[in-house]
Structure formats: structure tokens, C-alpha cells
Image (cartoon, rainbow, N blue to C red):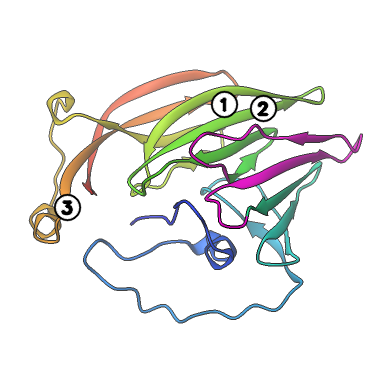
Amino acid sequence: MSIRIVAGMTFLALLAWACQSESKPGKKSNEPSVEVSFPYEKADSLFGFEGCDKGLYRADSAELFELTYSTYRVQVKNRENLPTSEITLIIDSTGRRLVFPPLSEGSHFQGKWRNFFFVDAGTGPDVRQLTIYKEENGVLYQIYQTEYLSHEAPMVSASGSLWYYRPVEEADVSEKPNCPDAEQWRKDGFRIGYGQRHLFDLTQRMLVRKSEYTCVPRQ
């Protein structure tokens, strides 16, 4: 299943993030349209990847929303006519405001786990860039950056490891995965791409590469 992580995200995509998924390439979605009145609030809302912390979601307009967690607030302002967002972290205990540095290919908040924050960027839907920040003593630190395949959604485990597939060349795949939809993807005009399972331990900052591969449609 693919996740909707595209430049110039609309509010409706953000609002539906907890259940974000779209049809595989070549198929049409039958989901009905959703009308929203502002302000809109949703408590205990999961925003971002599976395993991210839940919080209170509040949108005051299609361009501005805020997520309230136990010790933080994250404000996201979508910039008109630009495929990027301005992301601000507010530390409740001090009121300090920290602005996430803008990324060259756009910035999109993708949730948090404890004091780790995920920001997504990229110019295409297939391969995305994920930057991970850590808040410590009132300062934001970038601790990790990687490419990942959006068709296989990343997740955060209970122990605090980010599980994701990093794109790899076919020649680097030691054991080809089963790919039953490959022929249909080719008919639909896609090529076959491959990803290798990676686990990044957020607290220990340790990376593990698994001998586990997946295939995905690529533009």
C-alpha cells in the first residue's frame, strides 16, 4: 500500500493521515470527498507514521494546523503556492519556539516519537527524504537523514526503532523478493524498483541493514 506523501500536501490529505492509503498504481480510489468546517479538532489523533505519538489535532484553516502533545506543540503553516510547510516546535515547559530549518525540496511534518521529530521532503512520490531531529535542552539537532520508499510506509517500533525500506539498485539485491504485481505495474507504465529493510535505533543512533527486500512500482 502507498502513502500520500507528496509535495504541496492539501489539508484533506493531512486530515486523513491516520488512515492514509491510496490504491495501487493503475487503480482508482472510491473514497468519498470530505467537507471540513473550521476550526476542526480531533483528540488522540495519530499524525505521521505508524507508531508515532498521538496528540490533539486542531486546524484553524486549510493552511494552518497544530498538534498538541504531552510536552510539546507543533505548529504547521502551509505556504501558499509553494510545496513546503513552515514547522515550529513549541516547548510547553519554557514556551521556547524552535523553527525547523527549511529543506531544499520542501518540508512536511511527519509526526514525532518522544523528543524525536520526523520531517519529509522530496520532489517525487516514489523516493522521499526523511530527516530526523531531536530536541534536547531547548535545541533542535539533526541526528539522521535517509532516503526511503514511500510505497512501503515507515513505522516506529515500541522500542524506538524506525523501520523503513531504503531504495537499492537491482544488482545489490542478494535475494529477489516475490513480486506478483510486477507485470501489471509494467503494463501501467511503471518500472520495478527495490528496497532493503533498514532499522534505525533513535536513542542509540545505530543503523541495522537487514537481508530483507521488497519490490515497488517506480515512475
Res 190 label? 3
Alpha carbon separation for disc pair 3 and 2: 37 Å
Badge 3: how crowded within 10 Å, few (<14), some, or many (20+)?
some
Q: Nearer the viewer, mark 3 or mark 1?
A: 3
The local secondary structure at tag 3 comes to loop
Which stretch is magenta? 80-108
Instruction: Identify the residue position indicated by label 2 in the image.
Output: 134
Where is residue 49 shown, x and y percent of the image? 52, 48
Any magenta on residue 37?
A: no
- The kind of residue tagged 2 is Lys
Badge 1: how crowded within 10 Å, few (<14), some, or many (20+)?
many
In front here: 87 or 45?
A: 87
- The kind of residue tagged 1 is Leu
Q: Do the residues labelled 2 and 1 touch (CB within 8 Å)?
A: yes
The local secondary structure at tag 1 comes to loop
Where is residue 202 shown, x and y percent of the image? 57, 26
Give the vertical position of 140 relative to 27 (above or below): above
Alpha carbon separation for disc pair 3 and 1: 34 Å
- Of marks 3 and 1, which one's residue comes earlier in the chain? 3
Alpha carbon separation for disc pair 2 and 1: 9 Å
Q: Which of marks 2 and 1 is in front?
A: 2
Left or right side of 27 for 117: right
The quarter of the picture where residue 147 lies is: top left
Res 202 label? 1
For this orientation, the residue located farthest to the right is: 94
Give the residue at x 63% y 41%. 112
Res 17 label? none
Give the vertical position of 66 relative to 22 (above or below): above
The local secondary structure at tag 2 comes to strand
Give the residue at x 15% y 47%. 191
